[in-house]
Amino acid sequence: MSVATTYAEALYEAGAQEGALARVSAELAEFHGALSESPELAAAFENPEVAAGAKKGVVDELAAGAHALVTNLLQVLLDRGRFDELGAIVDAFGARVADAEGRIEVHALTAVPLPDDLRDRIVERVGAHTGREVSLTQGVEPDIIGGLVLQVGSTVVDGSVRHGFRDLRSTLVGAPVEAAISPD
């Protein structure tokens, strides 16, 4: 079990016991989102030259009014030097909550935004295959050129053009010279 999974599971159990899973999930995602939107703030948390007390003060300020489980988790991560695991913990916690609710989180990565009909087909097929309600999020990354990369739970299916090019390149680089120039 990874460090992130261990923290996520402990947070899930505590949140379930208090009946606060939805609130904890939302607040944790909001805090992580704020860090993601501010590279300067994220860099300050990662910088060992910034005093631990200053980091704790920032967490207290940013998480003011948040559920005690959220603020306690953030403080424990700072105390144990594990703050860099926050993103993985947020992901693992979200997956654990989704699993308990009978949902599965699917992330689609494409070169351009997905049209609604394709989003619907992905949700339908993954739902039929897993027997779960599908929660689909999408990211756009032009570097994949075309195709689709799907992350379903912890499984990644890479059907991108970029991945196809890499496979072809590996095949060509690894092929014997005779086979690479054979007229057949």
Image: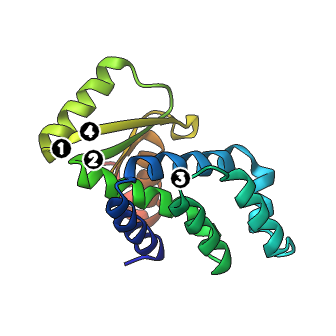
| Residue that label 1 marks | 132
Confirm or deny contact between disc 2 and disc 1 (CB under 8 A).
yes
Label 3 residue SS: helix
Label 1: how many Cα within 10 Å (few below 14, some 14–19, many 20+):
some
Viewer-side label of 4, 3: 3
**Which residue is at a point 16% across and 47% down the rendered structure image?**
130
Q: Amino acid at mark 4?
A: Val
**Residue 134 got which mark?**
4
Amino acid beneath label 3: Leu
Label 4 – label 3 distance at C-alpha: 21 Å
Q: Earlier in the sequence, mark 4 or mark 3?
A: 3
Q: Earlier in the sequence, mark 2 or mark 4?
A: 2
The mark nearer the N terminus, 2 or 3, is 3
The reply to whether discs 4 and 1 touch (Cβ–Cβ < 8 Å) is: yes
Identify residue type, mark 2: Ile
Q: Earlier in the sequence, mark 3 or mark 1?
A: 3
* Residue 98 rendering spot, x and y as whole percentages: 30, 50
User: Which amino acid type is marked by label 1?
Assistant: Arg
Residues at circles 2 and 4 in contact by the CB criterion of under 8 Å: yes
Q: Are marks 4 and 3 in contact (CB under 8 Å)?
A: no
Q: Which mark is residue 104?
A: 2
Give the alpha-carbon distance from disc 4 to disc 1, as whole Å. 6 Å
In the drawing, what numbered circle is on residue 172? none
Q: Secondary structure at mark 4?
A: strand
Task: Give the residue pinned by disc 3.
Answer: 28
